[in-house]
Image: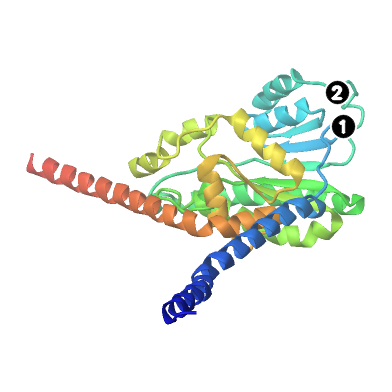
């Protein structure tokens, strides 16, 4: 073999050896990707094995507080459609009777529920009220009232059913919070804390009652087309209105379907729409997870959603500053006149 052939062979061997080093990162990337795919598939396969067994609504006794209108009434209707026996609780007797008539239109269960409803299988804490306004303009008594209605109004019914649920080793407890219970917004200094409190209650309670096969769901509905929202909009500050308009308004029947589905499945978080899903992932913190799949999704999406949230927060701050400047300019113009 000539020296040129030997030199050429040496170069070929060198390129072959070094080409493996060049391909090594790519090969490792493929191995990691394959491992991730296999891991995700495994999670999807075993996830149903650790998730709660769905609650059958047909023949179940469901109690709905705040059930005379809005989301509460639609939740009652949705459960009734699926064969549940419904107990409505509300303060306004006239609205309550009207809601009862509306719910009964959707009956599919021929049993005589009024003879004996039996123990409560699912409690829906939906009673609530809202006040919006600047912190210094909201009377202190309104802060107290919101905590009494929105927070303690959920504590009392839950205490009434929890002992029996523990004895029966089954049950669902739902707290209807709000997206304002996930993020504090302008104008909700009185309202948001009363809704944030529900999550603290729900997380602590879930840890206590999970061994008894009782599952808690916290629903975070967005602005929903209800009588309560219409009343709130009458006094809502301009900043709050503009911020709220960035996410639109949902229909109560659509919100109710999602909330009931999540409660039946035993999901801790119940969100509506893309914004709601993002907020739930961002604010999950140490909240309970009812499936490995849910936990993995939160891990994967956290960084992206935080980036998107920064743009939202920047937009909200811009709205507040713009309203403040416009208000100051209007005051200055009035003084000149």
Q: Residue furthest top?
A: 105
Tell me if residue 167 comes above or below residue 80 in the rendering.
below
Q: Residue at x 48, y 51 (%)?
A: 190
**Residue 48 location (% of width, % of height):** 79, 50
Reading the image, the residue beneath label 1 is 59
Residue that extends furthest to the bottom in the rendered view of this protein: 3
Label number found at residue 255: none
Q: Is residue 102 left or right of residue 227?
A: right
Q: Are marks 1 and 2 in contact (CB under 8 Å)?
A: yes
**In terms of depth relative to the viewer, which is nearer, 285 or 297?**
297
In this figure, what is the number of numbered marks?
2
In this rendered view, identify the residue nearer to me: 226 or 129.
226
* Residue at the extreme front: 1
Point out residue 275 in the picture as x, y percentages from the top left corner.
50, 44
Q: Position of residue 215 (x, y in %)?
A: 77, 51
Q: Residue at x 16, y 45 (%)?
A: 329
Q: Secondary structure at mark 1?
A: loop
Q: Which mark is residue 109?
A: 2
Q: Check disc 2 and report its element: helix, strand or loop.
A: loop
């Amino acid at each position: 073999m000539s020296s040129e052939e030997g030199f050429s062979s040496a170069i070929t061997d060198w390129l072959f050896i070094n080409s493996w080093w060049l391909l090594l990162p790519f090969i490792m990337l493929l191995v990691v990707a394959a491992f991730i795919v296999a891991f995700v598939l495994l999670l999807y396969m075993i996830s149903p094995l650790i998730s709660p067994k769905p609650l059958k609504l047909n023949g179940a006794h469901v109690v709905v507080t705040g059930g005379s209108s809005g989301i509460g009434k639609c939740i009652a209707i949705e459960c009734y459609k699926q064969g549940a026996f419904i107990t409505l609780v509300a303060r306004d007797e006239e609205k309550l009777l009207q809601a009862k008539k509306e719910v009964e239109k959707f009956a599919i269960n021929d049993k005589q529920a009024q003879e004996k409803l039996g123990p409560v299988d699912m409690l829906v804490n939906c009673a609530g009220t809202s006040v919006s306004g600047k912190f210094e303009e909201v009377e202190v008594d309104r802060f107290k009232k919101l905590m009494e209605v929105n927070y303690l109004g959920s504590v009392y019914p839950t205490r009434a059913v929890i002992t029996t649920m523990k004895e029966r080793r089954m049950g669902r407890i739902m707290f209807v919070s709000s997206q304002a219970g996930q993020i504090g917004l302008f104008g909700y200094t009185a309202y948001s804390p009363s809704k944030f409190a529900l999550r603290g209650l729900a997380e602590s309670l879930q840890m206590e009652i999970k061994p008894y096969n009782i599952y808690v769901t916290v629903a975070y509905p967005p602005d929903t087309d209800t009588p309560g929202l219409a009343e709130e909009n009458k006094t809502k500050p301009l900043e709050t209105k503009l911020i709220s308009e960035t996410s639109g308004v949902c229909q109560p029947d659509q919100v109710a379907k999602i909330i009931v589905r999540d409660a039946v499945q035993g999901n801790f978080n119940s969100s509506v729409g893309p914004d709601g899903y993002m907020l739930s992932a961002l604010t999950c913190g140490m909240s309970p997870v009812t499936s490995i799949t849910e936990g993995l999704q939160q891990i994967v999406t956290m960084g992206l959603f935080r980036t998107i949230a920064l743009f939202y927060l920047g937009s909200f701050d811009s709205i507040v500053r713009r309203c403040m400047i416009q208000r100051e300019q209007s005051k200055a113009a009035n003084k000149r006149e």
